[in-house]
Image (cartoon, grey):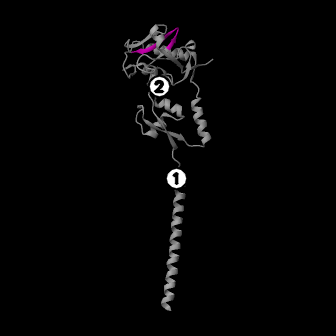
Amino acid sequence: MVFACSGQLLKRIFRRLRQLSSMVAVATTLSLLTTVSTFPPPAFAAPGYYTVKQGDSLWVIARRCGTSVAALKQANNLRSEALKPGQVLRIPRPQGTPGQTARARAAARRAPLPARSGDDIHDLLTYARSLLGIRYRWAGESPATGFDCSGFTKHVFGRFGVALPHSAAAQYSCGVPVARAELMPGDLLFFHTSGSGIDHAAIYCGDGRFIHASSCGGCVRVDALTEPYWSSHLVGARRLLEVKR
């Protein structure tokens, strides 16, 4: 009888121990979940992806996707701004409600052109002309080393607070389009001279003339848009500086 009672007692003890073990496991899980929920949120929510196309730059992609070049470089562990067609980039999304995020992207797309006075545009063209005669150098973007066409426009506009990518095709995505009949000094001109797509950029000076780093001429020079070659190869123009009225 004693042995029977002892056996029943042991069974109750084991059953109680299993119950206590289950309760401890649940409490531990809840504690872990509470701890995880108190961790600081990540800098960016779930990112999307973008496949780099010919002529793209980080500046163009950032503007198109409503983010920044710094955020793109951080999200993709990039040490430079060099991109290759076909490369897949993670696009970081800022924290916030869907409505806030959508409004932020829309605001980035609607960002106004940098306003400049007529004097500032005059100063920009004066500075551009001060570089006349500097040698042409492929991939160059400084007076010390020489310029290629987009390196020249990038350098000149950069001196006046407008950041441009180092690619004629990518620069064609910047600013707003301008009809040929509405060209103003300081507008960017884009040409198709060989191969496929846009491959040459220049700055319109007014009176049918433009300044550019010419590979054929071997230096920064001024040419006329009325010349048959340039007139027939003009693709379009973009305005980066809005004149204050």
- Where is mark 1, residue-wise? 39
Instruction: Measuring from the top left, give residue 77's x and y in whole percent.
Output: 42, 39
Mark 1 secondary-structure assignment:
loop
| Label 1, label 2: how far apart the Cα atoms are | 40 Å
Farthest residue, direction front: 196
In x, y percent, where is residue 239? 54, 20
Query: Measured along the vertical axis of the image, is residue 93 above or below residue 57?
Result: below
Residue 234 among magenta residues:
no
In this view of the protein, which residue sits in the foreground, 68 or 238? 238
Q: Residue at x 59, y 36 (%)?
A: 104
Tell me if I can see residue 109 in this picture: yes
Crowding near pointer 1: few (<14 within 10 Å), some, many (20+)?
few
- What is the x, y in percent for residue 30? 54, 62
Residue 144 makes an appearance in the image: no
52 lies above or below 193: below
Question: Quick one: SS at disc 2?
Answer: helix
The numbered dot on residue 83 is none
Which mark sits nearer the N-terminus, 1 or 2?
1
Label 2 belongs to which residue?
170
Q: Is most of the magenta stretch helix, strand or loop? A: strand
Task: Count how many numbered circles sit on residues in the image.
Answer: 2
- The magenta stretch is 204-214
Q: Are marks 1 and 2 in contact (CB under 8 Å)?
A: no
Q: In the visual, does 131 lie left or right of 105?
A: left
